[in-house]
Amino acid sequence: MKPDRLESFVNENRHEFDPMEPSDKIWESISKQLDKQPKQRIRKLGWLKIAAAFAVIALLPAIVYQLRFADQRQAAKAVQVDPEVQELIEAEAFYAQEVSGKMAEIQKCYQVYPELKGEIEGDLSELETMYRSLKRDLKENISNKEVIEAMIENNRYRLKLVDEVLEQINC
């Protein structure tokens, strides 16, 4: 590699640069300034961390509110659009509540008949998976009557299955 012109100039004239060294006082002041700079950065980062934590704490209730009540606002919009959708949503809620209530009764019987748990929950898990898929579809379009009707039919089938199980086990 060919030497750089600046590098060759410095090498050739080094003897002229040597007497021009800075005094010890200059090096001491530089050293003192170097010691002070990291402390100032730490303080700035400390305030930045405090400000970020405050911002998160201040925004957290708004985020939780948005997440918790988004479904309710969406349902309220659908009710305003179509009263038939309101009836379908109420029917879906009724069947879902009935299924969960009867499932609670069946779960009490698991102590007496532990083998039931695997059988019953295996059958119901497929229906639950389909129900969750329908619920995701409903979130995309709350006024989709076909999806709500499919959810109601799913809950009716689950309710029928749970009723049959309760009749058979009599616990």
Image (cartoon, helix red, strand yellow):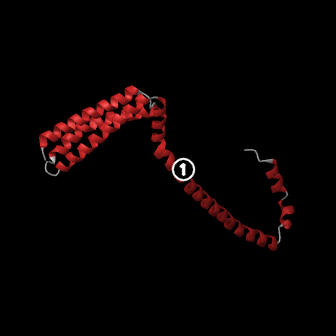
Vertical side of 128 occupied by 4: above or below: below
Compared across the picture, whether 105 is left or right of 170 comes to right
Q: Nearer the viewer, residue 4 or 38?
A: 38
Vertical side of 40 occupied by 99: above or below: above
User: In which quadrant of the rendered view does residue 38 lie?
Assistant: bottom right
The residue under label 1 is 62
Image location of residue 156, percent across then percent down: 27, 33
Which residue is at 15% across, 45% downward? 115
Q: Amino acid at mark 1?
A: Ala
Image location of residue 84, percent across then percent down: 40, 28
Which residue is at 64% across, 64% downward? 42
User: In which quadrant of the rendered view does residue 143 lie?
Assistant: top left
Image location of residue 105, percent across then percent down: 21, 47
Q: Most extreme residue toward the front, as rendered?
A: 83
For disc 1, the neighbor class at 10 Å (few under 14, some 14 to 19, many from 20) is few
Compared across the picture, whether 79 is left or right of 159 comes to right
